[in-house]
Every structure is written in C-alpha cells, then in structure tokens.
C-alpha cells in the first residue's frame, strides 16, 4: 500500500466525494435535488465544514449546473459537477458547448436508466446517449476505480494536448450506494498528482482579453473546430495511458484504456464495462481454473474508443461476446459497445465471431447463472464456428 | 492585441485558436451587418432637436454621435430595423427604400 494511504469501507458516492475533496476544485456547480446523488450532498457538507476551498454553486437545474460550470471554466477555474440519469439528459446542449469550448470540466455521472417508464436503477443508457458529445468517458468497475478515475480525470482533461471535458462513470446503486473497500491516497499525494491547473485562456485575464462562445461567422469555421476536437480525442489515447501509469506509481494501481484477463491463451472472450466486470471476472477466473479457455476484456475508456488496440487484443479469438448495459434501438443492431467493436474489426482479415448480450436494463440483475449461460453459448459458437443469434437479451423475460 | 485574420478563409483546421475563442475582442467591427437593410433611416437635420433618443434606442449602436450631437448613421452596421424612426419624438427620421436611397 502506498505511504500515507488508508483503507476505508465507504459507498461509491463517498469515494468520489473524497476524491473531489482531495482535488479541491475552485468551483463545483450542481443541482442539489434528485436525480443528483450523495456525491454532491457529501461534498456540500465538506464545503460547509471548511474542508475545501471550493466555491459551491447550488443551481436550479442540471442545465444551469453545466452552464455555471462552463462559465467558471472559461475564467480558467478548475471546475467539477456531478449528475445522473435525467440530470445528464437535461444538460444535453451544454455538454456540446463544454467540449466545443475545450473546457476541461470533470463530471462524475452515476449511471442510471432514463425514463420512461420511471426507473431509478442502473444502466448505461444515460451516458451512452452522450457518446458523441465530445467528452472523454471512463467507466469504473467499483468504488476504488471511481475514486481513482476521478483523480486521473483531472490530469487527462487538463492536458494541454487534450483540453476536453471528462465524464467519470460509475454504476448507479451497484457502485454508488454499496459499501466497498476503498484505499484512499494521502491528501498531499493527490494534490501533487493533480497539480495546478494552467488554463489555455481566461475570460478574466485583462492583459490578454478573449471573447468566448462566439458566432463562427457567415463563412463558418465550425467544421475546422470539430476536426480539432477529433485531434484532441486522438491525443487522449496516449495521455490516458501515461496518466494511468503515473497513477500506478503513487497508488500501486495502474490503468490503461482497457484491462485484459487471460487473453494470452483464451480461445473465446467476454468484453464488458462497468460493475458487471467484477462478476464476469469472478466467473471467468472460475472457468479458467477448470481449464475452460475463456478470457475477458474490461473496457475502461469508451470515449475515446480504443478500436485498433481492442481489435488487436481479440483478433486471435474464435468468438467474442460483448455485454451491453444499454441498447441503441437501431433495429437489431445491438448495444453501443457491440456496434463499435464490430466496426473496429471490419478491416481485419481474420476476425472472431461476435455476439452481443444486452443485459441489465433498468437495473435488471446480471446473475452468475446468466453469465454462465452466455459463456456456454459462446463456447459453443467457438467450437462450431457459428453464432446462433447475434443480438441476445440476457435476463429478459421471454 | 491585433490579430491578423485577413486570410482566415484560407486557414487549415490546425491554425484556428482552440475552443473557437476570439483573441481580439471588439473585432465585430470588421463584421459588417448593414447588408441586411431594406430601408435606411435618413435624418432631417432641420427637425432634429439632438435629444439623442435614437442613439440610446439603436440596438446595433449604429447611430453615430460626437460631443453630444448626432453626426449620422453607420450604414455598415445599421440593419434598417426602424426603431430610431419609430422612437423619434420629432418625426425627424424617415425610413427610405434602400434601393432608391442608393440610386440617390
């Protein structure tokens, strides 16, 4: 364990609040009522208790929360906000403004289903909908990763070659409201790791005045700015890995774009993100102990999508199952991870069979039995060289 | 700071400042909006009592004044909305068809 660290038993939202306390951003703007989570409730208490110097702005909606965050970030402040589910949906138009203005806002989002019907439980439909908004999206497997990702997100967002907002994603209830073992780093270690934010520009710098949020002119340069955003996303592949490796030095926990388990000798594999990775890992390790040649990939970065490296990692497999905790409603195209992974494989000469399992919508439990059912079907596909059905609903009453 | 954007239409995507910021605030002067106009305000100097109400009401700051006196209209920026004409208490500003005005 890293010097000065301590092990605590806390819920996922408290792990994120602790990371925020140690980051000590200049400003936190948030809507304080549901669908907001305890992240902001706990953080408000920290502000009231004088544990942080953050300016806390309680606003009247998530639309205003992101607006306030954008305004503050444009002055050169280090800014954070948090949301979940419908709150993220209400932020919609501002998400694009934050990324378009290249403001490195960090936002933990507790993944919960979108209405209707009204459902407060976990799925990834909220943040997957925002996948083209120009934000970096990092998924967490447990409270520890939610804590670690929040700290790393600051460095990734503020990197001069990136300057993009970052969403840290943690599964609603499964991570957010469950008590977990979390190793908290020393305050000073985190403060040194995140360092001081040096903004690219500031609205308050009277010596170098700038105008922000302008009309791009009748001739229009919008296209050029969107190309710049794509470049920043490309740069982020390397930076996410560098920051993840550097984080390993202070914590003993290194991070990359995704994690592989048993892929060196596996013949088939499961690709999964979020809290389900923990349950899948347990089953994969149990099966491997019995000699079943299964591996897994836990995807951490969904944006940027590490297409080339993922394709490389699974190219030798006979069959791969992709678990999606959301759907695209594209007409039997499967979930977003499946669609993008399938697209990543297109240029490969030799590619594995690919099968999709949409699971867990609206918090439907992903049991060990369901994982084993999918794994058995995957093993059969690898053996026979045929996929019975490419889009499957795991745990659906049918 | 002066920001040379003379050949901005030829810039490639890498040359633009990050986040679409404008590094030279106030350069909207270079963005002429007068082309929208179909009627232009023409002031009758005889009737005008220099109350400056048109100057205050103009939404585009296109009514020009110096030393407390109206000196004219900035036709590069006047969009021809007619607010000055409507607000003038002396009925000193007439809206004239732009095509006819140009023909003189």
Image: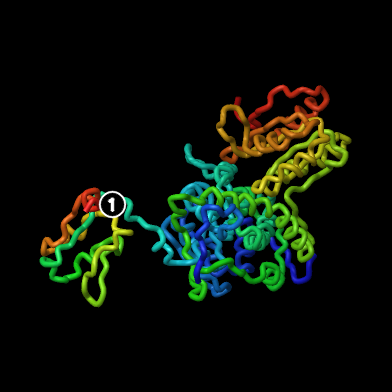
Q: How is the image coloured?
A: rainbow
Judge from the rendering whether residue A357 lies leftward or rightward of residue B59; answer left or right.
right
Furthest residue to the front? Answer: B104
Depth order, front residue of A99/B44: B44
| Element at label 1 | loop
The residue that disc 1 covers is B37
Q: What residue is rendered at 74% in x and 42% in y? A: A308
Q: Position of residue A87 (x, y in %)?
A: 49, 50
Give residue A354's position: percent from left, percent from top.
73, 30
Tell me if I can see residue A366 in this picture: no
Q: Quadrant of the N terminus of chain A?
A: bottom right
State whether residue A314 appears in this view: yes
In the foreground, A347 or B22: B22
**Residue at horizontal 19%, vertical 53%?**
B96
User: Where residue A250 appears, x then y in whole percent?
Assistant: 76, 66
Relative horizontal placement of residue B68, taking residue A374 as reference (left or right): left
Q: Quadrant of residue A60?
A: bottom left
Q: Residue at x 29, y 59 (%)?
A: B75
């Amino acid at each position: 364990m890293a010097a000065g660290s301590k092990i605590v038993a806390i819920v996922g939202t408290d792990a994120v609040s602790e990371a925020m306390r140690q980051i000590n951003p200049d400003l936190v703007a948030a809507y304080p009522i549901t669908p907001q989570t305890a992240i902001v409730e706990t953080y408000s208490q920290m502000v009231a208790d004088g544990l942080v110097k953050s300016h806390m702005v309680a606003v009247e909606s998530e639309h205003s929360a992101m607006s306030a965050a954008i305004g503050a970030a444009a002055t050169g402040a280090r800014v954070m906000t948090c949301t979940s589910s419908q709150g993220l949906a209400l932020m919609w138009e501002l998400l694009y403004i934050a990324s378009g203005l290249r403001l490195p806002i960090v936002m933990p989002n507790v993944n919960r289903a979108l209405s209707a019907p009204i459902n407060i439980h976990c799925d990834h439909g909220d943040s997957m909908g925002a996948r083209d908004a120009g934000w970096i999206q990092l998924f967490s497997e447990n409270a520890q990763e939610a804590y670690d990702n929040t700290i790393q997100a600051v460095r990734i967002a503020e990197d001069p070659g990136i300057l993009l907002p970052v969403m840290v994603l943690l599964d609603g209830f499964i991570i957010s409201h469950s008590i977990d073992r979390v190793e908290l780093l020393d305050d000073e270690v985190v403060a040194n790791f995140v360092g001081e934010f040096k903004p690219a520009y500031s609205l308050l710098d009277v010596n170098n005045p700038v105008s922000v949020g302008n009309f791009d002119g009748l001739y229009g340069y919008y296209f050029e700015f969107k190309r710049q955003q794509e470049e920043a996303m490309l740069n982020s592949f390397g930076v996410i890995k560098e920051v993840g490796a550097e984080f390993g030095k202070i914590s003993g926990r290194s991070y990359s774009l995704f994690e592989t388990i048993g892929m060196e000798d596996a013949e088939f594999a499961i690709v999964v993100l979020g809290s389900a990775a923990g349950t899948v890992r347990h089953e994969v390790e149990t099966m491997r102990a019995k000699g079943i040649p299964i591996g897994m990939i836990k995807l951490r970065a969904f944006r940027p999508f590490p297409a080339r490296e993922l394709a490389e990692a699974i190219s030798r497999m006979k069959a791969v199952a992709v678990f999606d905790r959301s759907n695209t409603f594209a007409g039997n195209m499967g979930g977003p991870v499946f669609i993008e992974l399938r697209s990543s494989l297109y240029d490969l000469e030799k590619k594995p069979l690919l099968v999709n399992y949409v699971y867990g919508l609206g918090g439907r439990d992903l049991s060990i039995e369901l994982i084993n059912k999918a794994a058995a079907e995957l093993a059969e596909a690898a053996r026979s060289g045929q996929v019975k059905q490419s889009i499957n609903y795991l745990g659906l009453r049918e | 700071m002066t920001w040379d954007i003379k050949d901005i239409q030829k810039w490639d995507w890498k040359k633009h400042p990050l986040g679409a910021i404008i590094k030279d605030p106030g350069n909207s002067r270079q963005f002429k909006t007068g082309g929208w106009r179909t009627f232009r305000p023409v002031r009758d100097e005889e009737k005008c009592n220099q109350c400056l109400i048109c100057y205050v009401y103009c939404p585009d700051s296109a009514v020009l004044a110096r030393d407390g006196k109206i000196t004219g209209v900035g036709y590069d920026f006047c969009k021809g909305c007619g607010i000055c004409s409507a607000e003038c208490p002396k009925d000193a500003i007439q809206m004239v068809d732009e095509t006819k005005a140009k023909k003189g």
